[in-house]
Image: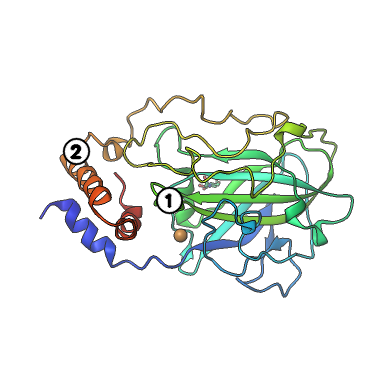
């Protein structure tokens, strides 16, 4: 039995039902706890979702803030330059998916607090996105597996009330249309300070609306050619946001070889054999069966 077959058999028995949600956020070290999954009880800044399941349709209204996200009562006070940490959790503890990008959007709620703001009315602009680490080539998302938060710095955005939307897209099954998993979480923030940044009209998008099921960022095989540049979905990062690299449409693959031996498909006979095997599975099995195999392979890095 080849090593990869052994891997597959071992992996297949791992339960895969649970996913995740945002348990809390922090702004410059101040913690803003969320309610438990499905609860909107205590005042919070986080619009808590009612299930940890992913959204899998790009036209699902839950793409905006996650499944049945509840209005929240509070606003977190944030100034441009503040560090924001987003703590994703799962039933098992830390977030466990490790393949796919993370993106952050803002939408202005208007002059009133965001507490009653309907996310369906939101005009979103992108302020941040991360794909693969340029040195290790691992997806930045994988850093969440240790319990670390996702990090961003609030850009020089004009004062006002905003929904902050953080999104993880899990791509382990994305080789099939409808296989990408979207996890979104909205927090309500009140931006103070003297920022002046505003998005242009053509940088504003609707969610759902901005993504297509066949986007090359959403219907994508991220395993066969791991060093292919990842094309992020949605609009480019708003031009006023400083210090952010442009989307990786123009980025070149990492040049370092550190840490990449195991993830380069031509590097080892085992990897090559697994790749061929996966290709065979994809071509000869019914879609559902193949989906199960791919799910089993989600932590198998190739
Ligand atoms: C966020 O920052 C912390 C502290 O620097 C770091 O340990 C963690 O890996 C970062 N998270 C991500 C997703 O890179
Ligand atoms: Cu999942």
Give above or below for 136 relative to 92. above
Q: Is residue 288 left or right of residue 100?
A: left
C-alpha gap between disc 2 and disc 1: 22 Å
Residue 214, position as x, y percentages in the image: 49, 42
Please state which of residues 170 and 120 is positioned toward the viewer in this rendering: 120
Query: Which residue does the image show at 72% across and 32% down from the upper left?
Result: 202
Query: Which residue does the image show at 21% across and 47% down from the upper left?
Result: 280
> Which of the two discs, 2 and 1, labels the residue nearer the N terminus?
1
Q: Is residue 186 left or right of residue 159?
A: left
Residue 254, position as x, y percentages in the image: 40, 28
Q: Is residue 147 left or right of residue 41?
A: left
Q: Residue lying farthest left?
A: 1
The quadrant in which the C terminus is found is top left
Kindly state the secondary structure of the residue where label 1 is placed: loop
Kindly state the secondary structure of the residue where label 2 is placed: loop
Dot 2 corresponds to which residue? 268
Give above or below for 12 relative to 273. below
Q: How is the image coloured?
A: rainbow
Please state which of residues 49 and 139 is positioned toward the viewer in this rendering: 49
Give above or below for 232 relative to 286. above
The quadrant in which the N terminus is found is bottom left
Query: Which residue does the image show at 56% across and 51% down from the upper left?
Result: 58
Residue 98's disc number: 1
Could you classify mark 1 by the number of other residues whose Cα lies within 10 Å: few (under 14), some (14-19), or many (20 or more)?
Answer: many
């Amino acid at each position: 039995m080849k090593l990869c077959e052994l891997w597959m058999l071992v992996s297949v028995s791992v339960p895969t039902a649970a996913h995740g949600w945002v348990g809390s956020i922090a702004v410059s070290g101040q913690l803003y706890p969320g309610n438990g999954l499905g609860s909107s009880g205590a005042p919070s800044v986080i619009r808590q979702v009612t299930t940890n399941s992913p959204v899998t349709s790009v036209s699902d209204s839950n793409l905006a803030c996650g499944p049945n996200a509840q209005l929240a009562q509070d606003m977190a006070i944030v100034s441009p330059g503040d560090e924001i940490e987003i703590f994703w959790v799962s039933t098992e503890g830390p977030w466990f998916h490790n393949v796919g990008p993370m993106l952050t959007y803002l939408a202005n709620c208007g002059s009133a607090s965001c507490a009653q703001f309907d996310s369906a009315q939101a005009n979103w602009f992108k302020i941040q996105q991360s794909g693969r680490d340029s040195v290790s080539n691992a997806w930045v998302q994988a850093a969440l597996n240790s319990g670390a938060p996702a990090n961003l710095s609030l850009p020089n955005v004009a004062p006002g009330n905003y929904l902050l939307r953080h999104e993880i897209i899990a791509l382990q099954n994305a080789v099939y249309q409808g296989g990408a998993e979207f996890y979104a979480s909205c927090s309500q923030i009140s931006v103070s300070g003297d920022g002046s940044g505003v998005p242009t009209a053509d940088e504003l998008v609707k969610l759902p609306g901005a993504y297509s099921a066949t986007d090359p960022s959403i219907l994508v095989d991220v395993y066969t050619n791991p060093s292919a540049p990842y094309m992020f979905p949605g609009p480019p990062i708003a031009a006023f946001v400083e210090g952010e690299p442009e989307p990786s449409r123009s980025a070149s693959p990492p040049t370092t070889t550190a840490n990449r031996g195991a993830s380069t498909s031509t590097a080892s006979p085992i990897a090559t054999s697994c790749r061929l095997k996966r290709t065979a599975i994809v071509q000869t099995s019914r879609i559902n069966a193949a989906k199960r195999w791919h799910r089993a392979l989600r932590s198998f890095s190739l």
